[in-house]
Image (cartoon, grey):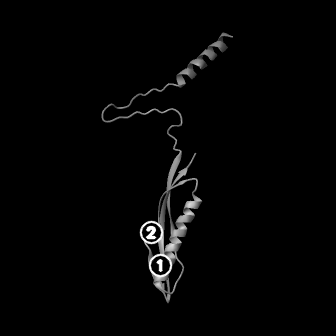
Amino acid sequence: MKVVLGLFVTLLVSISFAQSIGVKDIPADGDTTISVKKGNSADNKYEVTSGEDDVEGEEANLIKEARASWKKACADWKKELKELNKDNQVLSMNCGKMVCSTEGVESTCRSKATYKLKIQVK
């Protein structure tokens, strides 16, 4: 019985010491920072993510029409990005620089769009 009681007391003492923190053998020369945090305060509730997408207008016979088609495609892309991320915050979105090319009699304008979103993780 004394052995069981002794083991129980030893277990209680070791549990109470397990909640303390000891710092040893850290060189004192130079800059040293020791940080101890308890709980979930370090967990981020939000995460910022970024990406890119292609924006392309419809083919048109005139370059002016192709540019107008690209502007419409850019506006549609922005609208769709906002609708798909209603729960999250759109930090930035940019359709990029329009580049037009002509193949035969058809002209097409396209660009590389970029976006940055703030997404709720927890």
Residue 29 as seen in the image, left or right of residue 95:
left
Q: Amino acid at mark 1?
A: Arg
Q: Residue at x 50, y 75 (%)?
A: 70
Q: Residue at x 35, y 34 (%)?
A: 32
Q: Is residue 96 above or below residue 18?
A: below
Nearest the viewer among 34 and 104 is: 104
Where residue 65 appears, as percent x and y from the top left, is 49, 82
Nearest the viewer among 9 and 107 is: 107
Q: Is residue 25 above or below residue 49?
A: above
Mark number displayed over residue 118: none
Q: Nearer the viewer, mark 1 or mark 2?
A: 1
Residue furthest to the top in view is: 2
Where residue 24 appears, as percent x and y from the top left, is 41, 28
Q: Secondary structure at mark 1?
A: helix
The quadrant in which the N terminus is found is top right
Q: Residue at x 52, y 69 (%)?
A: 75
Where residue 21 appears, as percent x and y from the top left, is 47, 27
Query: For residue 9, which quarter of the picture?
Result: top right
Mark number displayed over residue 67: 1
Query: For residue 58, which quarter of the picture?
Result: bottom right
Q: Secondary structure at mark 2?
A: loop
Where residue 115 appears, as percent x and y from the top left, is 49, 61
The quadrant in which the C terminus is found is top right
User: Which of the two discs, 1 and 2, labels the residue nearer the N terminus?
Assistant: 1
- The residue to which callout 2 is attached is 96
Residue furthest to the left in view is: 30
Q: Residue at x 35, y 32 (%)?
A: 27
